[in-house]
Image (spheres, grey):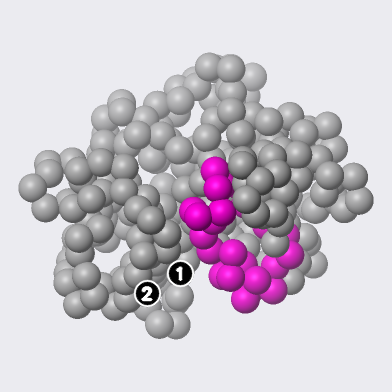
Amino acid sequence: MYKQGKYPITEKCAAAKGIFDITVKCPEIAAEAQAGQFAQIAAEGFFLRRPISICDIDKEAGTIRFVFEVRGKGTEKIAELNKGNMIDIIAPLGKGFKVLDADKKALCIGGGIGVPPMVGIAKEYGERAAVISGFRTSAVAILQEDFKTAGCETILCTDDGTAGIHGFVTVALEEYLQSKKPDIIYACGPMPMLKGIVDIAEKYRIETQVSLEQRMACGVGACLGCVCRTVKDGREIYSHVCKDGPVFDSKEVDFNG
């Protein structure tokens, strides 16, 4: 069950230009939160809250962490908050990633601001996880140390070749799967990227969960701002990304819709 309240920011830093990393002390939310869920965060002066993925959860410390990019006036207002300020949050919202048994291996794939949601799920697997991250350029390549500290194998891709593999995450994925076979793939990023990942995963017959990036208004399924076409029991239906997702089994998502 989600909670709503104002909580103190305990840490804040700039992860890259225009990308901010904040940690919030909220024990009751941290206790319930799962990797893949999100929060609706209030921006002073704006009626609608901004949906931001939960990057990481520390249940012992009672904190959750957000890494987000400034994409408009609302997120710019949130980015102005500093350590010691109170932040108004509704969380945890949505459906998170499912976690397999302790002997299973995972591959986590994030593109751009779809990389932060991979931190929490990658930590669930630690040394049994590999992470492929894709960014436009090395200047915005974030969270690589987090994955390495968790014991994950890290594979970095950049569109312009300034760091790691020169190319999209799908190039690295195809190469990875030629020698290794994870039990599950987790992915978050733009729809064309997800479609490419799912096409490759299906070829190798690997279960895949995708976290969809959609504009959300209410965050609890009350409005129609984030509907997407999905397939369940052989029939096409419209699902709320905020309530039925943001995590879906890849077989449920109509990537051509």
Looking at the image, which is closer to me, 110 or 126? 110
Looking at the image, which is closer to me, 228 or 50? 50
Q: Residues within 10 Å of mark 1 (few under 14, many from 20)?
A: many
Does the magenta-highlighted stretch encompass residue 145? yes
The answer to whether the residues at label 1 and label 2 have Cβ atoms under 8 Å apart is yes
Q: Residue drawn at (50%, 38%), measured in percent from left and top?
A: 212
Classify 213 as above or below 62.
above
Could you tell me which secondary element the residue under label 2 belongs to?
strand
Q: Look at label 2 and name its amino acid.
A: Thr
Percent position of residue 201, x then y:
76, 37
Percent position of residue 249, x then y:
62, 38
Classify 87 as above or below 180.
below
Residue under label 2: 63
Residue under label 1: 57
Q: Residues within 10 Å of mark 2 (few under 14, many from 20)?
A: many
Give the CA separation, mark 1 to mark 2: 6 Å
Could you tell me which secondary element the residue under label 1 belongs to?
strand
